[in-house]
Image: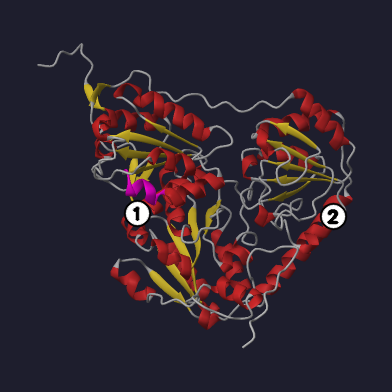
Amino acid sequence: MHNPSTPAQVTAGAVVAAFLEQCGVKAAFGVISIHNMPILDAFAQRGAVRFISARGEAGAGNMADAYARSTASLGVCVTSTGPAAGNIAGSMVEALTAGAPVLHITGQIETPYLDKGMSYIHEAPDQLAMLKAVSKAAFRVRSVDNVLGTLKRAVQVALTAPTGPVSVEIPIDIQSALVAMPADLSPLPIEAALPSKAGLDALAAYLAAARRPMLWIGGGARHARHAIQRLQKLGFGVVTTTQGRGTVPEDDPGSLGAYNIQKPVEAFYQRCDAMLVVGSRLRGNETLKYELKLPRPLYRIDADAAAEGRCYATDAFVCGDAALALEGLADRLEAMHYKADPALLTDLRAAHDEAVATLRDGLGPYAELVRQIQSVAGRSFNWVRDVTVSNSTWGNRELRIFEPSAGVHATGGGIGQGMPMAIGAAIGAAVTGSGRKTFCLAGDGGFILNLGELACMVQEEAPMVIVLMNDKSYGVIKNIQDAQYGGRRCYADLHTPDYALLCKSIALPHARVSRLEDLRGQLDEALAARGPFLLEIDMLSVGGFKSTFAGPPTNTVTQIPALAK
């Protein structure tokens, strides 16, 4: 008979679930297995965390990643060990590249057989080393006594800037062990890096001497909107990376949006006399492989001290949280009654408008597609994009977004991740009550990689619209072959499903757009759907882009001549 004074015994899996609830986790993603059942059983019994049954660990990882980015909170993915932990590696690399705070909990075989090389089912040799290679950090729970402590530390690491994915192995015998529910399930504090006062003093003095200063805003500054607006009031211009999109609403007249590498913008940079880069890695594909001519002097603020001098020489550097540093900088410049040259923003708007006009002209018939999606989407929506010609051409910059957590894209360049990412963002919108509709831009080449997740999407009634650009090929590969390989095309044409039949088989509403004149009615139908909708754009019928995209732009082009026949 149970003694009421004795704490009730629960599984360690229940401790995991209870702790995640205290972290504010409302949804988790993964695939059920014999090596994670105690945790998922606790999810089901407690009923506080909605578990999304993905069809594969790769998709589950992408879902957790996009959930984290679009809700500005912790994403959680639960997998099995061995092959399953290996399956998630690609999506962990994506989360690591994007700096997404994801907690990856993976099972592990029973501790008596662990690391013995006995070919035990689901065992992977040195799995922890593999996880460390694709994570910000990786931990193994060694006993039932340190389950909670390890998880607390893992979540703290994931959420501390620079944020990123963290993996935790929990052997199955530890997951199922009985323990008393801990009294203190509260997560550890997340401390923001304090910028140096002396560093801010010096930076403010440097910028006070500038008349035409620009802010380059990356994903690490998405939480700093208020401070950025203060600097804008002083006359600073703004440009964002794709990760920083929406930090300043993209219809703000003082912002270039994500038009950061176009020729008119690069020319405009040369008429600026300072640039402050905040929370950005200055990645190669957003700096013309580090050859983009940025204004000088170039200053940087970053929570990662190792960012100083990386990619570009730095004239002054402040290590610290972006919001704290920018607020401190604004305090100092306001006290100096600083004002930038008003002509800066006039010139900025001219450069922006020229870049936009060039891009829209190059879209040909698809300018209408962009206009219609923008019209129906409104101002509060998630914009999730896969790696596809359409995203590189217009999705990364021309469909405007207005909130810092609204944009999600495959930063690492891996195709096929957009659709499961969109599921994660859509679930995030549903469980947080944000009301955002999620739009997903995908190409047919990458889309088919995670085709099984369509079933997950339908089962979960994810509120999302997939805009599938279907040209039955790897369009960008053909363009690169034309531009750099003498027009020798190979391995780029694809056999694709009849999506009308495929969607019918899984009860997914679908419409095929063969004429853009019919687009608005089909978009209205897609938005009216309670759950997901697949809107297929038949590019072979609509036609091609006016301008050709042949890979990431650079300041130098290497043309590979055709071989003599």
> In this orientation, which residue lies closer to the viewer: 5 or 94?
94
Can residue 42 be spotted in the picture? no
Q: Is residue 216 left or right of residue 101?
A: right
Quadrant of the rendering where the C terminus is positioned? bottom right
Residue drawn at x 60%, y 75% as measured from the top left: 481
Report x, y in % for residue 480. 61, 72
Which comes before the other along the chain, label 1 or label 2? 1
Q: What residue is shown with label 1?
A: 56
Q: How is the image coloured?
A: secondary structure
Please tell me whether mark 2 sits on a helix, a strand or a loop.
helix
Q: Position of residue 150 (x, y in %)?
A: 40, 27
Distance in Å between CA atoms under marks 1 and 2: 50 Å
Is residue 25 something that shows in the picture?
yes
Which residue is the site of mark 2?
A: 346
Q: Looking at this rendering, what residue extends furthest in the left direction?
A: 1
Q: Quadrant of the rendered structure where residue 558 is? A: bottom right
Label 1, secondary structure: give it: loop
The region drawn magenta spans 81-88
- Quarter holding residue 447: bottom left
* Residue at position x 33%, y 31% in the image: 16
Name the residue nearer the viewer: 171 or 443: 171
In front: 558, or 507? 558
